[in-house]
Image: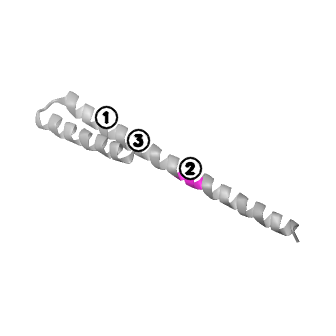
Amino acid sequence: MGFEDKAEQFKGQAKEALGSATDNESLTNEGKADQLKGGVKEKLSEAGEAIKDKANEVAAKLEDKRDAAEAEGDR
């Protein structure tokens, strides 16, 4: 996931540099687009991981409360 996104960004940088060096505006723009796509994918992946982490944190808290309530009921 992350590696492919970084690779796409790197590929975009290379295309942009080659486009600039050869005065090929189309290739330069394609490189910029590749970099943007890679960056967006990377941010979406990071956001998805953050959401999973938060969901796991909430689930753990709920489980702890449930366990505490069950222990209180056993008394």
Which residue appears farthest toward the top when viewing the image?
Answer: 26
Give the spatial CA distance, label 2 vs label 3: 16 Å
Q: Identify the residue position indicated by label 1 in the image.
A: 33
* Sooner in the amino-acid sequence: mark 1 or mark 3: 1
Dot 2: few (<14), some (14–19), or many (≥20) neighbours within 10 Å?
Answer: few
Give the spatial CA distance, label 1 vs label 3: 10 Å
**Near-viewer residue (65 or 16):** 65
Kind of residue sitting beneath label 2: Ile
Give the spatial CA distance, label 1 vs label 2: 27 Å
In the rendered image, the vertical position of residue 46 relative to residue 64, given as above or below: above
Q: Identify the residue position indicated by label 2 in the image.
A: 51
Question: How far across and down, in percent of the image, does residue 29 sit?
Answer: 25, 32
Q: Are discs 1 and 2 less than 8 Å apart at CB?
A: no
In the rendered image, the vertical position of residue 54 relative to residue 65, given as above or below: above
In the rendered image, the vertical position of residue 24 relative to residue 9, given as above or below: above
Question: How far across and down, in percent of the image, does residue 54 sit?
Answer: 59, 55
Q: Identify the residue position indicated by label 3 in the image.
A: 40
| Disc 3 secondary structure class | helix
Q: Is residue 72 left or right of residue 31?
A: right
Quadrant (top left, top right, bottom left, bottom right) of the N terminus: top left
Kind of residue sitting beneath label 3: Val
Q: Are discs 1 and 3 less than 8 Å apart at CB?
A: no
| Disc 2 secondary structure class | helix
**Near-viewer residue (75 or 21):** 75
Q: What stretch of residues is rendered in magenta?
A: 50-54
Question: How far across and down, in percent of the image, does residue 51 sit?
Answer: 56, 50
